[in-house]
Amino acid sequence: MSDTPALRLLSLGAGVQSTTLLLLAAEGRLPKLDGAIFADTGWEPDAVYEHLDRLEEKIAKPAGIPIYRVSTGRIQDDVLDPDKQRSLPAHTAGPWYEKRDPIEHEICPEACGWAEFNGDKNDDDAPEECATCHGAGYVVTKWGPPYKTRDLGMLNRRCTQTYKLTPIMRQTRLLLGAQTSDPKPCRYCDGTGERIAPWRAKRGDHTPGPCSVCNATGVLTRVNQPPKGVWAETWIGFSTDEIGRVSDRGDTRYSKSKHPLLDLKMSRTQCESYLKHRGWTSVEKSACIGCPFHGNAEWRRLRDTDPEAWAEAVRFDKAYRTGPGLRHERFLHISRLPLDQAPIDRIRPSEWQQGDFFDAVYDAELAENGDPDGCSPWACRSGAPVDASDAA
């Protein structure tokens, strides 16, 4: 592989950091970019698209930097489509059930030895499991009063892989000279463009619908690998306060990540100051309108400044609540309440335990401000980096 990249490309989220990188390159303070790629989920606030249009007209075009807008569909439509297995990392709540907690216990009266044993139950030296305490080493002597509860959780985050990283990597390969394969009949629907989705069949629903693999076209094409040894330097806008998110897991043989803001030792605050001095006083945070990682501050902003987007989020939240084959309910807000009923206004700590919706581990900071990380294709907001190899 050559030591010199064939292209320098910016992963453009249109937020503070990536906007800073585009301006720095346009001013010549960073090397010339060969392009910037914006992955459009179809559900960004209008302010993000307006900002992107302004960036393209005022900065990118005069500097000769093309902006490529790529997409794999509208996430808000796909998630509600029963013929597409798409999901958001929604907050979940299972069915209500009755529970009692032990409040008093004593050592097992059988003197079974499990009270002193701290090893693996499969250990050869472990005493035989006691039928009285079932290996706990103690028995409950008093139970608390019954109460209603439900199991809380969160769905896995797959949206970034599908709607951001995959189209970015596909466009990168095309720009590097990769060839697109000849169309072939889709083997999932036998070229008809219609099939019975397997997840529907498992529920006994054999209604045919549009094939989600070929997008009802009946044919499949693939963007192949670029020529051997050709690679792109992909700029990612992590600032110094986000150094914990930096990872090379997104690298492939044709795309290597670079973090110019770290080289310049620029924090997010410094990026904001830089943009302000150049007339970019307001840069919208890039994230889907109905992102479950929003904190109360963002939900309030949406409700108070963008009533159309708020109404859309409320409608989606209601429509996404249940689905065929699901035992749990899905919610956009961490309280597991309908969005238009959720406690998005500031609350006092003494109120946290009101009602059934606040779990004992409810994090007030997270609830107010949301996940501190942006919705980057290169670092997962739920904690684990996205794997670019899956998008090849």
Image (tube, rainbow, N blue to C red):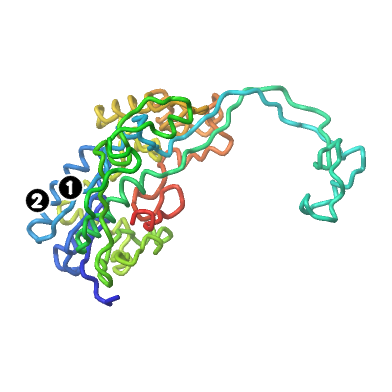
As drawn, the residue found furthest toward the left would be: 62
The number of callouts visible is 2
Residue labelled with disc 1: 52
Closer to us: 174 or 219: 219
Residue at figure coordinates x 30%, y 75% from the top left: 1
Image height check: is 66 above or below 265?
A: above
- Residue 124 screen position, x and y as percent: 83, 55
Residue at figure coordinates x 49%, y 32% from the top left: 92
Image height check: is 205 above or below 248?
A: above
Q: Is mark 2 on a helix, strand or loop?
A: helix
Query: Mark 1 and mark 2: span between their CA atoms?
Result: 9 Å
| Residue kind at label 2, given as amino acid type | Glu
| Residue kind at label 1, given as amino acid type | Leu
Closer to us: 352 or 286: 286
Q: On the rendered structure, is 350 left or right of 250?
A: right
Q: On the rendered structure, is 294 left or right of 182?
A: right
